[in-house]
Each structure stands twice: as C-alpha cells, then as structure tokens.
Amino acid sequence: MAYVDFAYYTNTYGGVLIPCEAFAGCARDAGAYLDFITAGSIGEVTDAVKNAACAVCEALYKTAGREGIKSEGNDGVSVTYADGAPWQTLARAAAKLYLPPELLYRGVL
C-alpha cells in the first residue's frame, strides 16, 4: 500500500530529491517496507506515517541501483561490495524518525 502521494511529498514533506515519474514506484516499495517493519499494524494513515513513507522513499531512491556497493574507484572499474543491504539500514533509520515506537515494537506488550 502506498501511504503517500507525490503532492504530499513535495508540498507538505518538502521533498525535492525524487522526480515525479519515479515517485509512484518508490511510494509503493516504501509502503511495503513500512508494512513489513510494523507487521501490518498501521491502521490510520497519520502525518507521521506519511512522513515516514516519504523518508523511506528517499532512502530507497538514494540507494537504487547501488545496493551492496561499499566503495567505487574513480576509474569506474574498481568496486567493493559490502555485506548486508545498506538500503535497509537507511530505510529503517528513516522510518524510526517518524513512526511511534509502538508501531515498530514486535514483542509482547
């Protein structure tokens, strides 16, 4: 589920990084990621949820096509890959800025 649209991203969140033509895919993927990290517990789509979706969109957009690259040489030939997925680290940190802790908690209350 996409929790945010391009109008909210540009007008309310103040986003400028993602072009309009790329936003729908980022929003869809950000929504799926938020559903995953919250175990589907997002009920009401609040401004906090929309802002988290925008932040995750930007994290996904920044790392698109560069997943796993730790460093790259100036000559364009040398590439070092890192273990793990850097987009997940950025996306989770971005979501945590806006989502209330109870949506991210996966234990028993």
Image (tube, rainbow, N blue to C red):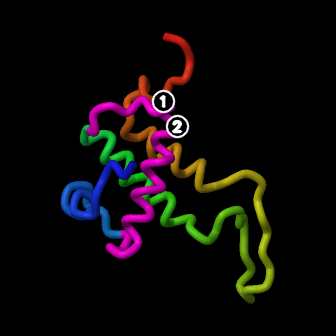
Circle 2 packing at 10 Å, graded few (<14), some (14-19), many (20+), is some
Q: Residue furthest top?
A: 109
CA gap, disc 2 to disc 1?
Answer: 6 Å
Q: Main secondary structure of the magenta part?
A: helix
x then y, percent, for residue 82? 76, 59
Q: Which residues are magenta?
A: 17-45
Q: Quadrant of residue 42?
A: top left
Which numbered dot is residue 76? none
Viewed as shown, does residue 55 lie left or right of 91?
Answer: left
Above or below — where is 70 with respect to 100?
below
Between 27 and 75, the one nearer to me in the picture: 27
Which residue is depicted at the point 30% across and 39% down? 48
- Residue at figure coordinates x 79%, y 69% from the top left: 80
- The residue depicted at 39 percent of the width and 48 percent of the height is 1
User: Which numbered tag is attached to residue 37?
Assistant: 2
Q: In x, y percent, where is residue 21?
A: 36, 75
User: Does residue 95 sit above or below 11 in this rendering?
Assistant: above
Q: Amino acid at mark 2?
A: Ile
Q: Is residue 1 above or below residue 39?
A: below
Label disc, if present, on residue 104 of the rendered structure: 1
Tag 2, which secondary structure? helix
Position in image of residue 24 (x %, y %):
37, 65
Front residue of this view, candidates 64 and 25: 25
Query: 23 or 70: which is nearer to us?
Result: 23
Task: Locate residue 80 relative to residue 42 in the image: left or right.
Answer: right
The amino acid marked with disc number 1 is Leu
Residue 23 drawn above or below residue 38: below
Please report contact status of discs 2 and 1: CB closer than 8 Å, yes or no.
yes
Residue 57: x and y, percent? 43, 58
The residue positioned 31% from the left and 63% from the top of the image is: 15
